[in-house]
Amino acid sequence: MLKALFLSGAAFALPLAAAEPIAVTAPHNPILSDGTSFSADPAPLVVGDTLYILAGHDEAAPDQNDFIMNDWQLLATKDVASGKWLHYPRFLKPEDVFKWATPGRAYGAQIIQAPNKKFYLYAPVMQANCSDKDCFGIGVAVADSPLGPWTDAHPAGPIISQRAPVANTIQNIDPTPFVDEDGRVYIYWGTFGQLRGIELAADMITPKGEEVAVKSLKGFFEAPWLFKRNGTYYMAYAGNHAGPNSDCTPAVYHACIAYGSAPSPLGPWTYRGVILPPVSSTTSHDGIIQFKDKWYLVYHTADAKGGGHFRRSVAIDEMQWDDSVTPAAIKQVTPTPRPPSEIGPQRNVAPAAKIVVSNDPVPVQCWSKALNDGIVRVNPLPPDMWGTWNGNNPPKPWIAYQWSAPVKLNASRITFWADHPAGAGEGVAPPKSWHLEYCDGSAWKPVHATSSYGTETDKFVEVTFEPVTTTCLRAVFDASQAGGGTAGVAVEEWEALSVEPVKLHLGESPQVK
Ligand code: FUB
């Protein structure tokens, strides 16, 4: 009998065996939102009246920038809108099934049902006793039910690795298997811009025919997801063609979910567009499925309590089609819940400001929007900050906020980030000095500071000044210089504090009320 606990938006509180699900009520995304269990790399599967989502399990500490993933977990629902899910934590570990695998690195896996009605799990795992440059290999396990028990379908080792079926030098992860209507089986996989595909025999494990290397899906990075609708094959994937004019992402560390289509399972593939803009985690990972007349995109974000780039959580949203074009196009998904349109009252009016920077377009590893996103991470990555480092660093960069209505300010807080010490002439260092200016008509004027301008890193440095009523504020930096070199400047968060708390309207054109 199921031992089901009903917890609100929570994962699990009692130590239960892997086979025992816990009932979760998820009023909104992410599905597991309370920060007790992080979930990543979702792969949906429909069996009868149930939608399953196989997911990895992020266990990195808050300051750890690494994929600590020791097992997979499973979520199941009969009604997405109800928000009621069964959660099977610690569903499966690599070493439980694959005797040739090491523990850990339980990256994105997928389960499909074969024509023989059995279920096959395709899982990237680390091979033990491996001398390859990259020891990830894709193992296959088989079961009579998605809930297992799972046994290794190919105990000799992975069906795909740097040695099989064709020697390669890529990282062999993120498998996406697919059974076509005629019963033929295909699998794609890959990361770091390398996408490979091959047909498998009816046994679901033996490679058949030529392997293809797909080059035509713009910005392909990882997380391919192969599916078919109305005779057209679709490949969704995490893309990272980055830049100020990119349809995908401004910052190279982040990814959008993009897609392409093809007339046959092995291509040729044509890029079609973006399904999901970058999410709050640097990685993005997609799974797409039809369940009870609706199409869904499942993905992950850093939005759970205590979440981060390596503490991700699975989310699900409806996906719509545009059938007025051929092939049918996927409409861009709006993630839910939508951000609030109004926040406050609060003194920090930065979230309502438009950001303008001296070094536009910023280097693609950085992201100006990080300046006023309210997030200061323990161990940030480049897209968690604005910065100037590009190998030819400007000596006097600046960042500015512009409001559509005047604000009355008397303080500002800033968090600098550096990987070099104060006084360095290379890398990213705290600025030699900095000051604040406000606009008065068309002229920039310095504020009358009543405290000093600190340059410490990794914490908020506050500067107070005599009140100014203005529509713009800017921070001007004198970059650190030494030995003829100029260091970069980086800022994680920059707050502009109004004299009194105010309500902020965060619509299309941000305003202060
Ligand atoms: O979770 C580890 C890796 O991060 C996955 O394999 C990628 O798709 C990315 O989500």
Image (spheres, grey):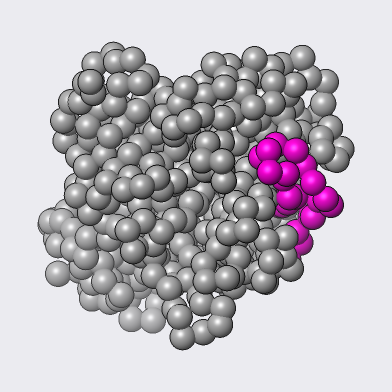
Give the residue drawn at x 47%, y 62%: 277
Image position, residue 282 (x, y; %): 51, 47
**Residue 447 drawn above or below residue 19:** below
Q: What stretch is highlighted in magenta?
A: 188-216
Residue 41 part of the magenta-drawn span? no
Residue lying furthest front in this view?
116
Dividing the image into 4 quarters, which one contains the N terminus?
Answer: top left
Of residues 260 and 197, the one nearer the viewer is 197
**Residue 224 visible at all:** no
Residue 194 part of the magenta-drawn span? yes
Image position, residue 449 (x, y; %): 31, 52
Give the residue drawn at x 38%, y 81%: 442
In the image, 86: left or right of 359?
A: left
**Residue 121 drawn above or below residue 320:** above
Of residues 316 and 358, the one nearer the viewer is 316
**Residue 295 visible at all:** yes
Residue lying furthest bottom in this view?
324
Give the residue drawn at x 41%, y 48%: 46
Image position, residue 374 (x, y; %): 33, 49
